[in-house]
Amino acid sequence: MISIVIPVLNESENLPCLLDHLKDQIGRVLAVELIIVDGGSSDNTLALAQQFKDTNRLAVSLITSQRGRAKQMNAGAQAAKGEILYFLHADSFPPKHFDVLIEKEVAKGNPAGCFKMRFDSKHWWLRFASWLTKFSWRACRGGDQSQFITRELFDEIGGFDESYIIYEDNILINELYARNSFVVIQQPIQSSARMYEKYGVWYVQYHFWAIYVKKWFGASAEELLAYYCKHLKKPVA
């Protein structure tokens, strides 16, 4: 079984679209469970998730946890029944029969990986950045590409590092690359460019690069979060 873990916080706009998409794209319905982990939404995210659960035959679990994507994803993994965990953002839409594609990779001996990515934007830089995700280079990885990993390997690593409020996906990916345990599935997952649209492509790209470089030179989880909040959580004028 594949356990799809979706951390959410005030995702009432995106979550219904994602759930409908998953329902249509899953290849083996009876071999998949959805685990929606809410971090304290103040909108109707949970009500919409409950409505989907009540009106569809997919196995759906709704749980709550402390806020923070790493904490939410670890909580989802703890509740999961599957031997394969698939961590998915609420604004990322995986390809048709993504579950079957993941199972095939695991069967081939690849215990972890992601999909290549395509932004829902026609901006030339975002299209180029999307194209780069087809390659296995570490610098081309990110949480928007989603993450599958066997439960055995996830437990061996110790899950997501909860000291990281941001960059938590990359910390896990770093560990997987260090173990040479990563594959990129060559079908695209479509991810939202909403942050780029909100703040501007070059502004966001510059600060994402800055965070990557800061971590490379040893910045702490607290320093990365402070930088992110200062530059990428500010009100738009």
Image (cartoon, grey):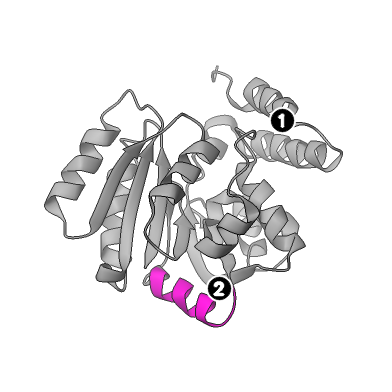
Provide the secondary structure element on which disc 2 rests.
strand
Circle 2: residue type:
Gln
Image point 67% across, 62% down: which residue? 132
- Residue 150 can be seen in this image: no
The answer to whether one can see residue 11 in this image is: yes
Q: Are marks 1 and 2 in contact (CB under 8 Å)?
A: no
Q: Is residue 52 left or right of residue 38?
A: left
Q: Is residue 35 left or right of residue 215?
A: left
Which numbered marker is on residue 224?
1
On the image, the x and y values in percent for residue 202 come to 68, 38
Which of marks 2 and 1 precedes in the sequence?
2
Q: Residue at (39%, 56%) from the top-left corner?
A: 4
Left/right placement of residue 47 relative to residue 100 reads left
Quadrant assignment for the N terminus: bottom left
In this view, the residue in front, 69 or 190, is 69
| Mark 1 to mark 2 CA distance (whole Å) | 31 Å
Relative image position of residue 125 (x, y in whole percent): 65, 51
- Mark 1: amino acid: Leu
Task: Look at the image and give the residue range highlighted in magenta.
Answer: 99-110
Where's residue 113, x and y in %?
Answer: 58, 65
Q: What residue sits right under mark 2 in the picture?
A: 186
Assign the C terminus to one quadrant of the image: top right
Which residue appears at 32% of the width and 37% of the height? Answer: 13
Residue situated in front as seen by the camera: 92 or 56: 56
**Image point 31% across, 59% down: which residue?**
33
Q: Secondary structure at mark 1?
A: helix
Q: Position of residue 74 (x, y in %)?
A: 50, 44
